[in-house]
Image (tube, rainbow, N blue to C red):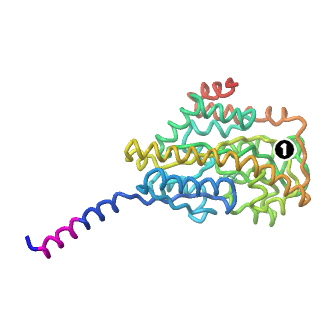
Amino acid sequence: MNTKLTKTLIGAAAMVVMTGSASLAEDWRGWNIHADGYPNTVAMDKFAELVTEKTGGEINLQMFHGGTLGSQPDAVEQVRAGALEVGNFNLGPIGPIVAEANVVSLPFIFKDVPHMFRVLDSEGGAAIAAGMAAKGLTPLAWYDAGARSFYNGTKPINTPADVQGMKVRVMNNDLFTGMIAELGGNPSPMAFAEVYQALKTGVVDGAENNWPSYESTGHFEVAGYYSLSQHLIIPECVCVNTDKFNALSPELQAAVREAAQESAELQRQLWAEREAASRAAVEAAGVVVNEVADKAPFQAAMAPVYEAYFATNPDLRPLVETIQATE
Ligand code: GTR
């Protein structure tokens, strides 16, 4: 064989190897609703970095922050359909799709955040994860989202009577509209990105969220009373499209899962710091914070919400009881 031909053949072979290996690498896109510097944003960027590192560049995840790829309910559908691969989702808007995952959105189901994580690390968590995976959303790790409390622009909330007649924004989920209705308020489901304007213009009187979201969105500027009802403690997931994940080799699956879990360790640490920092920042800005001395009337008012939930999901009563019995 003449040298020229040999060179050409080697060149062609090299091209095949190169294009072959290039087409093996997968490009993933990830959704996140939060702004720069938010614990979840930092942790999801870390996840993306670790995915590339641990898969040896076979998967490259590009994160899109600040909800630029749409609202949370839309993004959940996009990840389920495989139009996006990854999302950092609050389980609130997933509940209407995955019955098992909805247990975490029952008001006052968890005693505190450590209780929530103990449940997620037990058989209850396995049931929730299996239910989500079956609906196209495989959770790889759980993030902390603290406890959600009420805030509004007119007065401290101490009793359910204080919620009477108040228009309160909630995330999309019948459990949350039921929760506000049982307290005598008017629930208003709305996308996260619209809440600031709605509070400012009086379309709603109040909303509910954790310290970091209350602070990072500027809601505290237009709703200066924060009442520590802590009625919802809902985890968040690093979720991946089930089919895409299942199509990976076991080695790549392990690498991606490990990356998510390491990002969750970072997120939980950053979360603890940001909760304290956000609270301090809004208090310094003049927000009036009140403890809710007696949460029992709020809890008692939730009985019909639980009953309605059991009426449509009778088979999930044991899961709720397992959670309530988990120490
Ligand atoms: C935040 C949560 C977001 C979103 C938002 C909301 O705390 O991290 O994923 O669910 O609340 O209220 O819509």
State whether the magenta stretch is mostly helix, strand or loop.
helix
Rate crowding at label 1 as few (under 14), some (14 to 19) or many (20 or more) other CA atoms within 10 Å: many
Inspect the magenta stretch and tell me whether residue 10 lies in it.
yes
Q: Quadrant of the C terminus?
A: top right
Residue 190 appears left or right of 56: right
Q: Position of residue 51 (x, y in %)?
A: 49, 53
Residue 114 appears left or right of 120: right
Q: Position of residue 40 (x, y in %)?
A: 65, 53
Front in this rendered view, residue 286 or 43: 43
Can you tell which quarter of the image residue 246 is in? top left
Which residue is drawn at the image coordinates 90% and 58% (left, top)? 284
52 above or below 320?
A: below
Label 1 residue SS: strand
Which residue is drawn at the image coordinates 59% and 29% (left, top)? 122
Residue at mark 1: 228
Front in this rendered view, residue 76 or 308: 76
Q: Amino acid at mark 1?
A: Leu
Q: Quadrant of the N terminus?
A: bottom left
* Residue at the limit of the structure toward the left, as seen here: 1
Q: Position of residue 168 (x, y in %)?
A: 77, 52
Inspect the magenta stretch and tell me whether residue 276 lies in it.
no
Residues in magenta, as a range: 3-13
Q: Position of residue 82 (x, y in %)?
A: 44, 55
Can you tell which quarter of the image residue 232 is in? top right
